[in-house]
Structures are given as C-alpha cells and as structure tokens.
Amino acid sequence: MTFAILANDTTYTYNLRGELIRQLVALGNEVLVVGSLLSFQEELTQLGCRLIDVDTGRQGKNPIQDLGLLQKYIALLKHEAPDAVLSFNIKPNIYGGIACKHLKIRFFPNITGLGKALEYPGPMQMLTKRLYRIGVSEAECIFFQNKENELFFKKNHLIKCGVQTVLLPGSGVDLNRFVPLPYPKGETTHFLFVSRLLKEKGIDLYLAAAKEIVGKYSNVVFHICGYCDDSSYQEIVSQAVSDGFVQYHGEQESMQPFYALANCIVHPSYYPEGMSNVLLEAAACARPIITTERSGCMETVENGKTGYLIPVQDQNALVEAIECFLKLSRDEQEQMGLSGRQKVEREFDRSQVSQKYIEVIDRKHDENVNGKALQF
C-alpha cells in the first residue's frame, strides 16, 4: 500500500511521526511525506520516504491562498493515487480531507490540538467549524490527542454520524531517543521553559515568576529555549536577559543538553494543545514538570508525584509551585523525575501510538473489503 502523510513540514513529521513511518515501511508500504521541506529531509529519505514539497501556509488566513492549497492537494493526490492519507495539523486536516473526499481516498486525520482558530469564539471559529465539518466528513476514523478536543468536536457537531473516533495519548514519545538523564547534583537549581515564545504558551507568566524568584532566592537560574517570531517578545526577553533573571538560548535542534541541565521544566501554557510534546520528552528524560490544569498538559503529570499542576494564568500559583519544588531535597526532586519517566513508559510510548494507527487502518480495510457494518 501507499500512504501519504500530510503535515505542515518535514521537521514536524520526522520528530513526531518517525516511528509511525518506520512501522509502515517495515510492513512493506510506500510512504509519501507532503509538506514544507525544512529539517530532517535526509533522515526521512533514509527511512524510505519520498518527499513532496507543499507549503501549507500554516500562519496564513487568506482564503484565496487556502483554495490554492486545496487545488495542490487535489492535483497531487490524483497523480500519486495513495491508498490512504494520514493528516496532521489544521490545514492538512481540512483541505487534505476535502481533497480525499473529492477523490474518494481513505482518510485518517489526527486532531493535534484545536488551535486558536477553533478555541476562541468569533467569525474565524465559525468559519473553521464549517470547514472542519466538510474536511472530516468522510474520514474513516478521526484520531484525537485529548478528551477535551474530542468532546469539543462532538458537542459542536463537527463529526458526521458513523465516523469512528479514537483517543490517543498524544503523539507519544520516543523512549529510545529520550532516555533518563543523570539528575543535576550541584547547588544551583535550573528551571527551563521550552516553547515558541507566545503569550498563550505562558511566557509572560514564566518571566514574571522568574523575576520574583531570582529576587528572593540565590542559586536559581531560569532558562528559555524556543523560536521567537514576535518582535515585541524579542524585546521583552532581551530586556529580561539584560536584567539578569533569565538566560535565552534561542531555538534548538536538540533539546537533550538542556534537559540534562534542567532540574525542572516549567510550562505554564493555556494554549489549545493536543498533547504537549515538550512535557512528554522532558518526563521521558526523568525531569519533574510544573504545568497547568489545561487539557493537553495536565495528562502528563501526577500532581505532587511527578510534578505540580497549577490553575491556568495564575502567576501566584506558579510562584508557589516553584517554591515548593525548591524546598525539596535533591533526592526528592530526582525521584519526582524518575516517577515521571515511569508514567510515560506506562502511558505514552510512541511505538504503542503507531501500532494503534496500524491496527485501526488494517481493521478499517478489512471492514471495507468484507462489507461489514461498522459498530460504534
């Protein structure tokens, strides 16, 4: 069989879908990766993929450009004629789904988070709902990464009657790539924020907490890793660095050296996540986590055992959680991280996520071939 994977770019596809690709190729399938050709092109080719460059315009809101993306998908999928399409991210889900509906190709979208377009009421939400209803209407199965997203789709009637849904533990985490790292033993405690520098990811809360904690405690350092495309936040973070209460390391291709440095990962996000890959990776590296009671984040933490959960947009609660962590001994902090590793081994192994994909696709294929009525 030939599978086409539609996603925003090759970086996303390799980092989060590499295990799925390995399993598909190992079963003798051909895999096409469709998206912007960024990092990891060589690695994907070595896995056995064929790469096709399509710019999804992930940040764009121009309907004319989106119609152009739809036309590209239709032309490409008509030419390649894959047996099934697996899609990820909002625009590939919507416009890839419409293309598959038009061409009668088997379609399996993954809702990797609602995104701001669906999260916040208004004209954009109304338009996105309508587009999603069309895009996923002929899907054989829709994969969700958290229960809240699945309930949102059902409550807003975005799923056609008879379409199966499957809840996955996010994208899972590669437990062979992200392994337990030796826990830092020095006197200095290092906190780490990893994300694009967006307000909804909690960067303002992190900076404010860092300033307050550094003013009260010695031997505490706050680090930031992540891409910043907002000039206002570039200035804000630069000023925080100048003031001496954070260190900014920019975007990093490999996070392991920073996970090794960190005593604790802080992710005060209220962004509409699917499942936070940063938190899964950090926990796999045996690092404690402080994050919010937000779907897509809270599933990764057992409060008080593997880290701390705080209410969303609550700066005081964030400061209190950081202070609670600072009061723990190094042995207690290390044990918290090891408990987090055990949790991801039980619940978030990426190979299990990939295997679930293959099981669902195979079962659907058998049902189609045998003409069985689907039971949900």
Image (cartoon, rainbow, N blue to C red):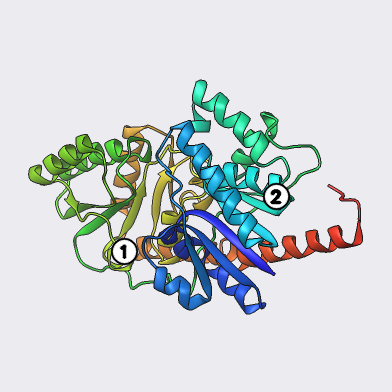
Query: Left or right: 91 with respect to 286?
Result: right
Quadrant into which the N terminus falls: bottom right
In the picture as drawn, the residue positioned furthest to the left comes out as 242
Q: Residue at x 56, y 31 (%)?
A: 128
Q: Secondary structure at mark 1?
A: loop
Query: Left or right: 256 with respect to 339?
Result: left
Q: Residue at x 25, y 69 (%)?
A: 185
Residue with the mark numbered 1 = 253
> 284 or 37: nearer the eye?
37
Vertical side of 174 occupied by 209: above or below: above
Residue type indicated by callout 2:
Leu
Tell us which disc is closer to us: 1 or 2.
2
Q: Residues within 10 Å of mark 1 (few under 14, many from 20)?
A: few
Residue 121 visible in rendering: no
Q: Quadrant of residue 42?
A: bottom left
Q: Position of residue 146 (x, y in %)?
A: 59, 46
In the picture as drawn, the residue positioned furthest to the top comes out as 122
Q: Position of residue 49 (x, y in %)?
A: 52, 71
Q: Are marks 1 and 2 in contact (CB under 8 Å)?
A: no
> 241 or 332: nearer the eye?
241
Query: Left or right: 159 with respect to 309?
Result: right
* The label number, if any, that marks residue 103 in the structure image: 2
> 34 or 154: nearer the eye?
34
Tag 2 or tag 1, which sits nearer the N-term? 2
Spatial separation of the CA atoms under disc 1 and disc 2: 37 Å
Q: Quadrant of residue 282?
A: bottom left
Vertical side of 103 occupied by 84: above or below: below
Q: Quadrant of residue 319?
A: top left
* The label number, if any, that marks residue 203 in the structure image: none
Q: Position of residue 121 (x, y in %)?
A: 51, 22
Residue type indicated by callout 1:
Glu
Q: Residue at x 52, y 63 (%)?
A: 33
